Amino acid sequence: MSGYIQTIGRIEAVTVADTNLMVPVPFQLRRRVRETADTVTLEMAPQEPRQRIDFSPGQFNMLYAFGVGEVPISISGDPARPETLMHTIRAVGAVSTALLRLKKGAMVGVRGAFGTGWPVNEANGKDVVLIGGGIGLAPLRPVIYHLLSNRKAFDKVTLLWGARTPRDIIFRRHLERWRCRKDFQVDVTVDAAGGDWQEHVGVVTRLIPRLTGDPTQTIAMICGPEAMMRFTVWELLQWGLTPDRIFLSLERNMKCGTGVCGHCQFGPVFVCTEGPVVTYARIKSWFQRREV
């Protein structure tokens, strides 16, 4: 499935290349994985193998809860296993709450995959730094799968991730496995913790000065709350990264998935169609404006 946006002056008009692009494909919920109290990973599969959705790390799908509505959600599964579609969802509205209440065997409407992905090709031969906050680790997980499956194509790979408390940590088993690898550095921090927490305490940006390597040979990929991303960008610039080597996922700005409703407009960028992954160089004059 694919579609494209045809620009006519400053008007974004949707041109449907596939007549089925706007029709949700029914996927069956095969498994629910409880990540935290309000976050669940849904594992789904199409009723027919030919209806599987191939995707690149960083892309998103439109998920339709029948009788409720549709919402854009980044894909959190392995791009090398498109036969199983994974989405990690936090209950923040009517549609996401309805999706999280679904039981095994229920049907979900899916359209996609849409949007731009993480710059995995541009990162070949370079150090890669992944920085996430909260559920922002979910859109980063596909690129982690890709990096580790093609580990020899990249130099040093580092993940810095922050959560509010230890109870808000998602993908616990994955984090444990990743930490056992000698070729993948993983640092986790929490904003607040009790005495039984033995790791970093504080915001994730405090981990950035610990980075080693050459900033001129590093690509950074960031996803999380906007305030966290703003401070992360500033710290990376101080470390020596240039704006064109900093990539952010602006998925929180999306709504309709096609750029028609205008909700996703971020300065000159329509996030649904030009994102969700964009370079900081593309949006830096708008990113620091809190009212945008």
Image (cartoon, rainbow, N blue to C red):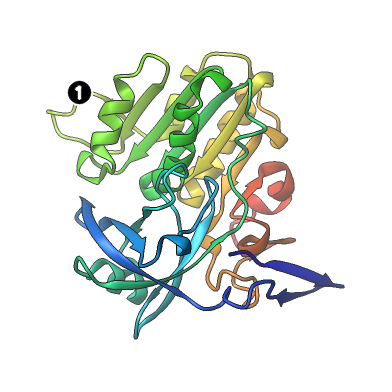
Question: Residue 183: in sight, yes or no?
Answer: yes
The foreground one among 200 and 137 is 137
In the rendered image, the vertical position of residue 200 relative to residue 30, given as above or below: above
| Image side of residue 242 versus residue 208, left or right | right
| Image side of residue 77 versus residue 39, left or right | right
Question: Residue 154: in sight, yes or no?
Answer: no
Residues packed near mark 1 inside 10 Å, few (<14), some (14 to 19) or many (20 plus): few
- Residue at 52 percent across and 28 percent down: it is 129
Q: Picture coordinates of residue 113 (x, y %)?
A: 54, 60
Residue 12 quadrant: bottom right
Residue 29 quadrant: bottom left
- Residue at 52 percent across and 40 percent down: it is 222
Under circle 1, the secondary element is loop
Kind of residue at badge 1: Gln
Image quarter where the C terminus lies is bottom right
Residue 192 quadrant: top left
Q: Picture coordinates of residue 94 (x, y %)?
A: 33, 76
Residue that numbered label 1 is attached to: 198
Number of labelled discs? 1
Q: Picture coordinates of residue 249 (x, y %)?
A: 55, 49
Q: Picture coordinates of residue 174 (x, y %)?
A: 29, 34
| Image side of residue 15 versus residue 192, left or right | right
Extreme residue toward the bottom, this view: 67
- Residue at 45 percent across and 71 percent down: it is 71
Image quarter where the N terminus lies is bottom right
The foreground one among 232 and 187 is 187
